[in-house]
Image: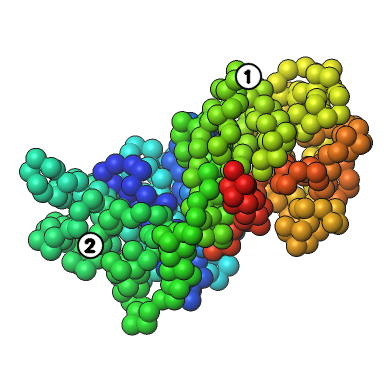
Amino acid sequence: MTRYIFITGGVVSSLGKGLLSASLGALLQARGYSVRLRKLDPYLNVDPGTMSPYQHGEVYVTDDGAETDLDLGHYERFTGVSSRQSDNITSGRIYQTIIQKERRGDYLGGTVQVIPHVTDAIKEFTLAEQDGIDFILCEVGGTAGDIEAMPFMEALRQLSIDLGRGRSIFVHLTLVPYLAAAGELKTKPTQHSVRDLRSIGIQPDILVCRSEHAIPDSDRRKMSLYCNVPETSVISALDVSTIYEVPVSYHKEGLDVEVLKAFGLAHSSEPDLSQWEDIIDRIKNPEGEVTIAVVGKYTGLKDAYKSLNEALAHGGIANKVKVNIQWFEAEVFEREDAIEQLVDVDAILVPGGFGKRGTEGKIAAAKFARERSVPYFGICLGMQMATIEAARNLAGVSGAGSTECEEQTNPVVGLITEWVREDGSVEQRTSETDLGGTMRLGAYPAKLKDGSLVAKIYGKTDIEERHRHRYEVNIGYVKQLEEAGVSFSGMSPDGTLPEIMELPDHPWFIGVQYHPELKSKPFQAHPLFASFIEAAIKQSRLV
Ligand code: GLN
């Protein structure tokens, strides 16, 4: 029997609902239960794929090619369960489906309404693909009381009745602010937010209260009384120094026990949290540190590079070192003398990105890394820029560039218009195709060259990694580049798409067309990130 945990938020956004969901998932797993996590997003975009990273942080990509909310990245990192297209829904997608059906005449002359049509579609999505899993955790985006979130709240309210007693609970995350002038924590915003929920028929079973100070028993009692939840179900969530401490910290506050109690399940045994304790120990007691320069474009908002940040931290966990990230706006390096700012870093990473702005700065960073033998990791756009740099300066391809930036006489990176999926189907597009959902998206296999650095790092020659890009290194230039010393050590199985480039004469220079950061976990760093940090440690000993 699959049970549902609905997670809502109140008072303000950014309280860490995604981390709460992911951590609760991890705690239930540590008790031997299977879990799956879902995100219900009230906004009207069909998916976040077309949103600027500044609007909505990183776009997380699943194996099955969905462009999703970054919270799905947290879910995967904390539980190790691969997310699917069916784990993220937006109002936009729901309305798109309903309106398409309406146009087809599927509603047989009926009036199409939010209740029941939109709410039914949300319920259908929430109930889909249960696969015998013990707990499905559904996080609702936004904050209780938002107009946009109403259909979702209503659908979940109905669902809790449809599922029957003991099959679902509501967990509500709120803020208990500290007023310095009064020297007090304030519970009123929480009371109001729960009142909002109760006015639409939702009674939270558990309250999780984010606050900067421990919640005194008197405040706990007050919230219990006014919000109609047992006193033990008022859980306090204090700030912790690393996100990987959150599961253990929620366990200490009794969250998992309260959840099991709310379902009437046995809760006397202790979960096995050893893997989390080991991670916390490695983070808190590093044996050294390295500094990595990340040369990007959206460096003003760290959420824009969420998975990348985490994957670098995982590389640090694997090597027991602290990883300091120094952010650089790529455009800065378009001024020639600026490049010397990179002399003190132990390694350079150029992440994914879109559009022309900053590309010449990224090319300059790749050149610096190549010439000075500094470890270089290029991801997606970072791989394309490193290839262009090698084409210009090693292979003598004058004016080498990417057609993403402008028309090229030497399009070393170009738009591909046709490619084969693993199931043999052919995907096609033109430069006129819609921007949403038309990139090479999701997991694709690649074959690695025996004896290459990447084959050594992965410990195998068949890999599968997640993609999200429109442009590719042009196969027409591969021979010329290889003659100049670039090794294309990873190719698509049909040999037409270069997936990895490396420089065999360099200590660590790897560019990958895919996004390895999306598959990295704290308890199992992605091999490329573990190896990159190891290379940075070696470099730090040289400097
Ligand atoms: N803009 C490049 C492309 O579309 C790279 C994309 C990325 O880095 N994710 O191919």
Could you tell which of marks 1 and 2 lies nearer the N-terminus?
2
Left or right, 161 with reference to 498 = left
* Residue 308, image x, y percentages: 56, 45
The quadrant holding residue 450 is: bottom right
From what the image shows, is residue 250 above or below residue 74?
A: below
According to the picture, the residue beneath numbered tag 2 turns out to be 234
Q: Residue furthest left?
A: 182
Of residues 129 and 208, which is closer to you in this image?
208
Disc 1 marks a residue whose amino acid type is Glu
* Residue 274, image x, y percentages: 45, 73
The quadrant holding residue 468 is: top right
- The answer to whether residue 355 of the structure is visible from this angle is no
Q: Residue at x 26, y 43 (%)?
A: 11
Of residues 191 and 151, which is closer to you in this image?
191
According to the picture, the residue beneath numbered tag 1 turns out to be 336
Label 1 secondary element = helix
* Residue 18, image x, y percentages: 42, 51
Label 2 secondary element = strand
From what the image shows, is residue 198 above or below residue 362?
A: below
* Residue 515, image x, y percentages: 65, 45
Label 2 lies in ligand 1 vicinity (Cβ under 8 Å)? no
Q: Residue at x 56, y 59 (%)?
A: 319
Disc 1 versus disc 2: distance between alpha carbons?
A: 57 Å
- The answer to whether residue 354 of the structure is visible from this angle is yes
Q: Residues within 10 Å of mark 2 (few under 14, many from 20)?
A: many
Left or right, 299 with reference to 168 = right
From what the image shows, is residue 446 above or below residue 396?
A: below
Q: Residue furthest front?
A: 542
Left or right, 226 with reference to 53 = left
Q: Residues within 10 Å of mark 1 (few under 14, many from 20)?
A: few
Q: Residue at x 41, y 60 (%)?
A: 284
